[in-house]
Amino acid sequence: MENRLYSVAQIRAAEAAAAAQLEAGALMRRAGQAAADAALALLGEARARPVLVLAGPGNNGGDALEMAANLSEAGVDVVVLHLAGGGKVSPEAAQALARARASRANFADVALDVRDWALVVDGLFGIGLARPLEGRYRELVTGIDAVRCPVLALDVPSGLDADSGAVVGPNGVAVRATHTVTFIGDKPGLHTAEGRDHAGRVDVAGLGLDPSLFEPARACIAAPAMFASRLAPRRQNSHKGEFGDVAVVGGAHGMAGAAVLAARGALYAGAGRVFAAMLGPALALDATQPELMFRAAHDFEIADRVLVLGPGMGGAMEAMRALGAGIDGATPVVIDADGLNLLAASLDLQERVARRQAGTVVTPHPLEAARLLGISAHEVQADRLGTARSLARRLQAVVVLKGSGSVVARPDGDVAINPTGNPGLATGGSGDVLAGVCGALLAQGWPAWEAALGAVWMHGAAADRLVEEGIGPVGMTAGELPAAMRRVLNGLVAKSGRG
Ligand SMILES: NC(=O)C1=CN([C@@H]2O[C@H](COP(=O)(O)OP(=O)(O)OC[C@H]3O[C@@H](n4cnc5c(N)ncnc54)[C@H](OP(=O)(O)O)[C@@H]3O)[C@@H](O)[C@H]2O)[C@@H](O)CC1
Ligand SMILES: Nc1ncnc2c1ncn2[C@@H]1O[C@H](COP(=O)(O)OP(=O)(O)O)[C@@H](O)[C@H]1O
Ligand SMILES: [K+]
């Protein structure tokens, strides 16, 4: 998999294997050099003001001390705030401290707001964070929020769990960095949950480890290369039957909009024909999208149609019957929104989902995932990868756990974290559009894993384009997504063509 993400345990194993082959302290010196290079790149010509380096008690602090020595050797004015802690110090961190003390860096116990810094470097804690930040550490970390310069985190923003992207502690704090240089391998927690807010832009410094030292990654960052084989340009001699029928099953009384948004998502993602099978009063027409065909759900023929089960479906018996019929059908399905709430209420339906032969994509937001697993939304967010994996295993389906850094998981445990999208998507109906897009890709023959990855990546990229154009993040509407997503999709298709 490209853009690999490693768990802390995997990073530790690779680090130990590499350290056994190298001279003592070599990895820390390499980390300190990579960190200094990243800082120099960020500073550019801005050398007049000093750089503040916060160095913690462990090896993350050791990296910071090596970096401080390198920066001062490069002529940068460096102030080091070293918090020694009371515990045992590794030989390499002790060596780094000696080197930094012998350099021109100034050691001082300064307050964050006493100077106008060019850069603040967070080398307090990395993957060894063992508990929530308290006392002086907490003060420093919250103080960083007030500085106006760039903040560079070393390895992991202090206070963030590198595996999950959760801020550690019930009332925890973590550094909000503008940039993170992460060592040895990239980590999932930098890209999902609170990770995107705290890590900023992430660069990986591999430190020259031999790839054979790594256990296989079970996670990666999603990228178009993962679904590129499905993006072939259409043949001239094609007809709408080749691009499949999508039927959105939903739209109970008062919730027609959800079904319409999903149907538009499907239309703009290239489905041959799109139906909205309404549980509530069937609309005659969507005047702005007259291509959509409305039917009453109770006498709609679902055979041979890819189904998007759930947008605005409600919780009535009729909805449960429609969901069951869709699940028992032989075509690929997407289950979303109220469809997931109904599923959460029925172990029988969950088992029927797990027995399906055709592709199944399930798209819960954290609360829907929590209902499905009988846990709290907080517990879901504390372990998004684990949650998505266990749902995928339980339902034998591809699961998209939505939110910042959506996690796409499949039953064998592989996951991808989506890097596109922004808070403009936090608006009613954007999930309905996603479900429709996913349905259209399934209808065009994409396997469930690629359809989920493609839908999530393009849906987020559409929102990113809208932000670039000034249409968001504030006030972006779900109805604006389908056309923006269509531009993203056609752009990818054009790129995938020959020559
Ligand atoms: N080893 C190597 O070769 C390489 C390592 N690398 C670098 O090392 C980092 C990992 O180093 P690490 O294992 O020393 O952990 P680190 O993140 O510094 O924190 C542990 C220290 O903090 C303490 N502590 C923990 N939580 C605390 C809290 N809330 N509040 C207060 N104290 C707390 C804990 O002590 P404790 O009190 O728990 O005994 C311990 O002293 C990694 O992220 C990377 O940057 C790279 O250079 C590559 C080569
Ligand atoms: N802060 C965010 N950053 C990135 N994507 C987001 C964010 N908030 C929401 N999204 C995305 O927007 C969509 C919202 O879906 P959902 O919660 O089901 O909303 P609705 O039910 O209103 O349609 C999902 O694709 C989700 O991943
Ligand atoms: K750090």
Image (cartoon, rainbow, N blue to C red):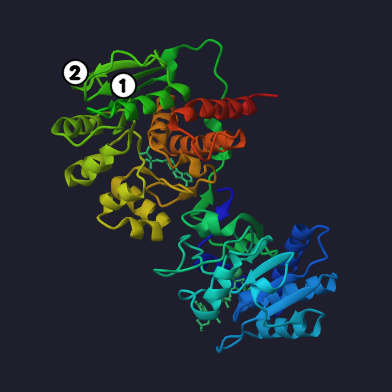
Q: Position of residue 64 (x, y in %)?
A: 68, 74
In the rendered image, which quarter contains the C terminus?
top right
Q: Position of residue 495 (x, y in %)?
A: 64, 28
Question: Which residue corresponds to mark 2?
Answer: 299
Residues at marks 1 and 2 touching, judged by CB atoms closer than 8 Å: no
233 lies left or right of 270: right
Looking at the rendered structure, the kind of residue marked 2 is Asp
Looking at the rendered structure, the kind of residue marked 1 is Ala
Q: Is mark 2 within 8 Å of ligand 2?
A: no
Question: Which residue corresponds to mark 1?
Answer: 276
- Name the secondary structure under disc 1: strand
Residue projecting furthest to the front:
114
Q: Position of residue 111 (x, y in %)?
A: 65, 77
Residue 131 appears in the picture as rendered: yes
Judge whether 425 appears above or below 254 on screen: below
- For the residues labelled 1 and 2, the Cα–Cα distance comes to 12 Å
Q: Position of residue 26 (x, y in %)?
A: 72, 75
Tell me what residue is drawn at x 85 percent, y 71 percent: 75
Residue 231 appears in the picture as rendered: no
Q: Nearer the observer, disc 1 or disc 2? A: 1
- Name the secondary structure under disc 2: helix
Judge whether 395 appears above or below 67 on screen: above
